[in-house]
Amino acid sequence: MAEKEATRAAYGRKLAELGEKHDFYVLDADLSGSTQTAVFAKKYPERFFNCGIAEGNMISVAAGIAATGVPAFASSFAMFACGRAFEQIRNSVAYPHLPVKICASHAGITVGEDGATHQFCEDIAIMRALPNMTVVCPADSASTEALLEEVLNFDGPVYMRLGRYSVPQFYTKGEREFKLGKGIVLADGKDIAIVATGIMVAAAMEARAELQSIGIDAAVIDIHTIKPIDEALIKEYAAKTGAILTAEEHSVIGGLGDAVASVIAEDGNAKLAKLGINDVYGTSAPAGVLLEHYGLNAAGIVEKAKKLLNK
Amino acid sequence: MERNTVLELKEKAARVRMLSVEAVYGAKSGHPGGSLSIADVITYLYFERMNLDPNDPAMESRDRFVLSKGHCCPALYSALAIKGYFAEDELKKLRKLGGMLQGHPDMKGIPGIDMSTGSLGQGFSAACGMAAVAKRKGYDWRVYTALGDGEIEEGQVWEAAMFANQYKLNNIIAFIDCNGYQIDGAVSDVMDPNPVDEKFRAFGWFAQVIDGHDFEAIDNAVNAAIESGKPAAIICKTVKGKGVSYMENNYTWHGKAPKDDEYAIAAKELEEAWIKAKEDVKNG
């Protein structure tokens, strides 16, 4: 397994690479070092705008750029890109269906020590509520890079959720095709399907091995696109396993768990448990410590899976 | 500016005012006050200044106009209809189910609308984004935008003003429609944005104060703005509700439609003004 890396790093690297062949602009709000857009900025200063600490303006400026026909990537921390600038995203970007790609880093609790004001665990819920919006949350570097190219080529607004925390790498570059809206079955199983997104995909794979050792055969599905969600795949595994466990570094309200719930409720053939942040604000601590504290790890998945299966 | 041009613009503006109030009356809702105050600026841009083609609304080399004070779209829709972007009949379906003309400008559904606006402050930023592309790519088209004096209470306006100065956007011209009123009353009573010109200057803009109903003044100001080499604000002193006696300087006409008897008075006044303006054109 390759070395650990944060998805924001893969984003910065790939963005600069895509800049060679594709015409687009990149905007940041004084966090280009953290979001990694600085890599692009250094290479293509004539296509970069640092907007200063003014996220609302950044999003609407990106919309104006996109209105001329050129895609625009806008990055900041999820808290500010999606949180502070929500209404600009809704009215300047999503409503007119403009090709603005909001690539927000430092999502979820793995921001770590900065604490609750910067740990945004509600962004998926907010973004998936918007008509026209596509919501993407990659799990590792190879998937971030592949999906970023899809995001660029997609004609419309996208919210891409990226992290600060270094995560294990399990996809190999070029090994498989990533399509927006198509989930990936990383491992098959018949007893339960662990439907995960973002950094929880790696935890799900780890949990799968542990579950196997106690006789539970778990499937693992990477839902990198939360909207539009891969309904067919989720329905298939609901019917096949009868038990779905969702795992996300996000609130259990409105995120992947609720998106999956909406899909399987129609057929009513599977039980569902949601692993995520349970309607609370985060707290200051190193990211790894927080993941353990909130049970967002393999152990948390195993425990929840056993409970769901009454084992 | 030649006398004939001024007279022709006055005639067009009178027609824009007529259609605007008729549309708001038909919709039984909307924003007549600010539509009437910005009508002359919009008329000037669409009938005199901007490079555009109603038969090719998306023409890449066109000048852009962003109505950041999007609620005043009755004036913009009326100008677009007169220019031939769409049939005047569409104005009768303003704000109605199935109609093309939304309560606020919708760039996806309405030919000639360069940006969807309505949430105050955002259009100004988007206009800056367009200007930034034109500047970086060396395009010679310009971006014009119009804001209200109530709108500039939005903090985003000043974020955008900083952005335009930072990136030396000498290809954007912002008209600030200073009619002195917002929906809750006089801007000076609600949240005084004055002095507007000094604020823009402090943000690095070239700022002029003019009579926003004087076409020669508007024309001169735009020429001076282009000469300035800076992002330029043209602060237009205007009369809210201009052209309808009982609406003038009366903030209660910010966002409501006239009733039947009220509309009869407005229609009569506006039509008389239009007929007179047409005669003036004929007589030279």
Image (spheres, coloured by chain):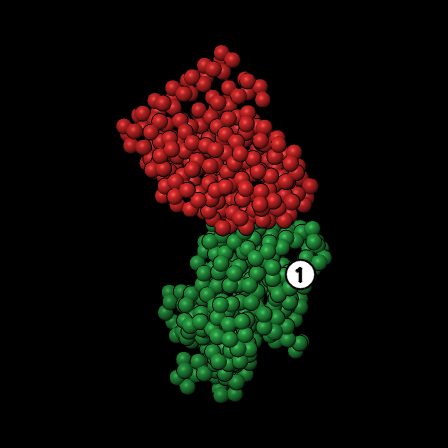
- Give the residue furthest to the bottom: A214
Q: Is residue B264 left or right of residue A306?
A: left
Are there few (<14), some (14-19), or many (20+) residues within 10 Å of tag 1? many
Residue A40: x and y in percent read 68, 58
Residue A74: x and y in percent read 58, 56
Q: From the viewer's perspective, is residue B142 above or below residue A104?
A: above
Q: From the viewer's perspective, is residue A110 above or below residue B255?
A: below
Tell me the SS state at disc 1: helix
Q: From the viewer's perspective, is residue A162 above or below residue A151?
A: below
Chain letter of disc 1? Answer: A
Asked whether the viewer can see residue A219, the reply is: no
Quarter of the figure with residue B58: top right
Q: Quadrant of the N terminus of chain A?
A: bottom right
Chain in red (letter): B
Quarter of the figure with residue A176: bottom right
Residue B197: x and y in percent read 53, 39
Amino acid marked by disc 1: Ala
Residue A136: x and y in percent read 54, 62
Q: Is residue B187 left or right of residue A20?
A: left
Q: Nearer the viewer, residue A197 or B115?
A: B115
Chain in green (letter): A
Q: Quadrant of the C terminus of chain A?
A: bottom left
Residue tagged 1: A38
Residue shown at 63%/69% (left/top)? A141
Q: Nearer the viewer, residue A167 or A164?
A: A164
Quarter of the figure with residue B244: top left
Residue shown at 68%/57% (left/top)? A41
- Give the residue furthest to the left: B261
Q: Nearer the viewer, residue B235 or B111?
A: B235
Residue shown at 49%/30% (left/top)? B212
Q: Nearer the viewer, residue A13 or B175?
A: B175
